[in-house]
Image (cartoon, rainbow, N blue to C red):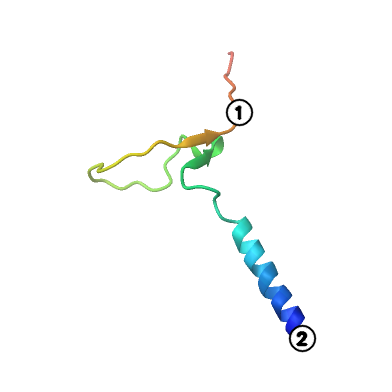
Amino acid sequence: MKLSRTMCIAMTMLLLASCANPSQSTYNDTDVGHNAVILFGTVISERPVDIKGTNSRDTE
């Protein structure tokens, strides 16, 4: 019984960890270009980010 509870906790922790964003500075190309939340105010800081994805252009 104790082993199955330990396995259940371990599996839950693994599942939750796999849902986490690997870095707060890395985004997919599908995450860029649209607003998730709009807040009006003053920009007080900025930071560089990495965008992972394909580098393609429309040739139309």
Between marks 2 and 1, how big is the CA–CA gap?
Answer: 48 Å
**Screen quadrant of the C terminus:** top right
The picture places residue 22, in percent across and down from the top left corner, at 55, 49
**Measured from the top left, where is residue 23 in percent x and y?**
51, 47
Label 1 neighbourhood size at 10 Å, few (<14), some (14-19), many (20+)? few
Tell me the kind of residue under disc 2: Met
In this picture, residue 6 sits left or right of residue 46? right
Q: Residue 9 occupies which quadrant of the picture?
A: bottom right
Question: Residue drawn 73% across and 84% down?
Answer: 2
Does 6 appear above or below 58? below
At mark 1, the secondary structure is loop
Does residue 49 sit above or below 12 in this rendering? above
Give the secondary structure at mark 2: loop
Give the numbered dot on residue 43. none
Q: Residue at x 70, y 77 (%)?
A: 6
Which amino acid type is marked by label 1? Answer: Thr
Identity of the residue furthest to the top in this view:
60
Per the rendering, the mark at residue 54 is: 1
Q: In which quadrant of the rendered image does the N terminus lie?
A: bottom right
Mark whose residue sits in front, 2 or 1:
2
Q: Which mark is residue 1?
A: 2
Give the image location of residue 5, x and y in percent: 71, 80
